[in-house]
Image (spheres, rainbow, N blue to C red):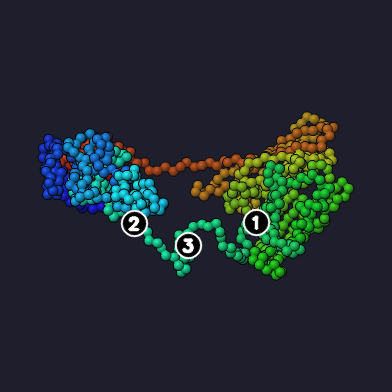
Amino acid sequence: MHADDVRRDATPPIHSLAKRLATAETGFDLLGVLTSPCSARPMCTSQLALLQVFFLMVPEGIWPQPSFSPLGAVPTPSDVGPASPGGTLESSSEGSEAPWPVSGISTVGPTVLTPSAPGNGTVDLFPVLPICVCDLTPGTCDINCCCDKDCYLLHPRTVFSFCLPGSVRSSSWMCVDNSLIFRSNSPFPSRVFMDSSGIRQFCVHVNNSKLNYFQKLQKVNATHFETLATEFGGGSFTSTFQTQLPPPHYRAGDPILTYFPKWSVISLLRQPAGVGAGGLCAESNPAGFLESKSTTCARFFKNLTSSCTLDPALNAASYYNFSVLKVPKGMTDLQNMKFQVPVTLISQAGSPLLSGNTCQNVVYQVIYEIETNGTFGIQKVSVSFGQTNLTVEPGTSLQQHFLIRFRASQQSTTASPTGPRSGNPGYIVGKPLLVLTGDVSHSMTLLQSQGDGICSVKRYEVQFGVNAVSGCKLRLKKVDYSHLQQEIYETLHGKTSPEHVAIFGNAVPAQKREWTKILSRNCSVSATHCTSCCVIPVSLEVQVLWAYIGLQSNPQAHVSGARFLYQCQSIKDSQQVTEIPLTTVVTFVDITQKPEPPRGQPRIDWKLPFDFFFPFKVAFSRGVDSQKGSASPVLILCLLVLGVLKLETK
């Protein structure tokens, strides 16, 4: 766009004109504007149009940059011609004026002119392109294809209703607000139209639009084919198969590789886990490197007679008839025995045997001990089993326990008798609650039931900050009321009755000050008036009081106290009891007393009146000439600010 041509002859400019009129009387509302000099066009007469003018003070230096008109609002060549009174498009040509688009003020005189061109004939503003992309039918005129030479049309727009995209040169317009244009003497095509928001725009046609640039065909050869494909290419459905070497060593969480020499098969070390509401065993759960974990799952048998000897999950041999790879790179050389670690059997384990109505030597517990040595991988693997006998009957179930423990090979089993910490120093929510029995530290446990609801040997760990409830049925093999009460106590809190609870998560058994005694109240025989009754506990509630101490930015949780609260029930000696339902509950109570928040220093709360700055606004709103030589408002303001600062510093 040639902006200089648009404003070159616009005399007088809007800014200088506004300045001259600003000091004059405000009664002027008519301005005579010469549409164009008589010398600009041959055989022209001077015309004087009376326009109502509303002057807006526009600061110097502000001139909006021209912009492309929005899509759909750009005038097209078919718009050339007289506009109807109700239309929004107005045309102007060389020497025509851009009217003032002031809302509510009508213009006097003609404002819509038909563009004229020097010489005879009409100038086509959008000549056809050298490449006619819409000419799809050779030898035939394609409809609305304005560049089709088979149509033999000098002016296709007079025949076609519109031109297909690509058949004419794309038009580009640079637009500014029409109120900024006083007069246009531009030799280039111009338009005045109203956009979608109702604002009239003055637009000039760009004769060197970038939309008409041609993209040259890029030559591709073998030297830079790969470079271009990488730079401009995207995803592909095909991929190049590359042989990926296994990592040199295990990382934490990586599955542990196993090798079956008999079948030359590489597999993973499995740790079955319970899934679903029934806790059924999922065989595909892999064991993670350096992740010591314990899982429990249940197995149900429709026909234990056949599963007793055929199901590998019941056979101990299926848990050690393989070797473990020290590092993953041992996959590349399976014949090298230095990368293979055999699984050592610690406890004696027999094969399952069906004897009459009993399936003997069934595995119910598997414990792996794995020694590691950093990046050198696995150094030793040992396994021990727990076996039991199952009665062959419909709906028989078995609950299995799988435990995998990792330890460093340079450490002995007696190097850390206290076990892992539950926090340092404060407890971490979800870590085990540490208790002390004698001089042995362990975690507090709760009841756990088997698949049929009978109390299991396996117990839940009490997690700090997590309330829990569990229950099961204690099946009595022999009713002996003299030892029944002690047996139930051991079932509720475990065979090793906790005596102390750790105050912090890093408590050491040798430091007695780091432990607090657990308050306990057992069932009293004198609590009942029955002489031939036995009082037994049926429920245990573990109540733990804890609080945060230390910095509020890094609080540390500690146990303030704990107690065992038993609920007892009396049974008569004459009752034949075979099952007793038991319940254990653990609750954590936060007794943290938060300190009061710190208070800041008192400050003077002052406010200014609503019209405080009104005198200064009046003083500064006067003319520039009236303010010359008068510094009283500035002086008053400075004195006021100094007074406020002096009050605030007191």
The amino acid sitting under disc 1 is Gly
- Mark drawn on residue 532: none
Place residue 82 in its image quadrant. top left
Residue 43 or 439: which is nearer the viewer?
43
Q: Percent position (x, y) of residue 573?
A: 83, 33
Residue for badge 1: 288
Circle 1: element type: loop
Residue for badge 3: 230
Q: Percent position (x, y) of residue 7?
A: 19, 49
Which tag is nearer the camera, tag 1 or tag 3? 3
Circle 2: element type: loop
Please indicate whether residue 312 sits to the left or right of residue 215 in the image: right
Q: How crowded is mark 1: few (under 14 residues within 10 Å), some or many (20 or more)?
A: many
Q: Earlier in the sequence, mark 2 or mark 1?
A: 2
Which tag is nearer the camera, tag 2 or tag 1? 2
Q: Percent position (x, y) of residue 499?
A: 69, 46
Residue drawn at (81%, 42%) of the image = 394
The amino acid sitting under disc 2 is Pro
Which tag is nearer the camera, tag 3 or tag 2? 2
Residue drawn at (55%, 56%) of the image = 237
Residue 334, placed above or below residue 152? below
- Mark drawn on residue 130: 2
Residue 252, placed above or below residue 548? below
Q: Find out whether the residues at labels 2 and 1 contact each other: C-beta distance under 8 Å.
A: no
Please indicate whether residue 396 sits to the left or right of residue 295 in the image: right
The amino acid sitting under disc 3 is Thr
Q: How far apart are marks 3 and 2 (CA)?
A: 34 Å
Circle 3: element type: helix
Residue drawn at (74%, 46%) of the image = 298
Q: How crowded is mark 2: few (under 14 residues within 10 Å), some or many (20 or more)?
A: few
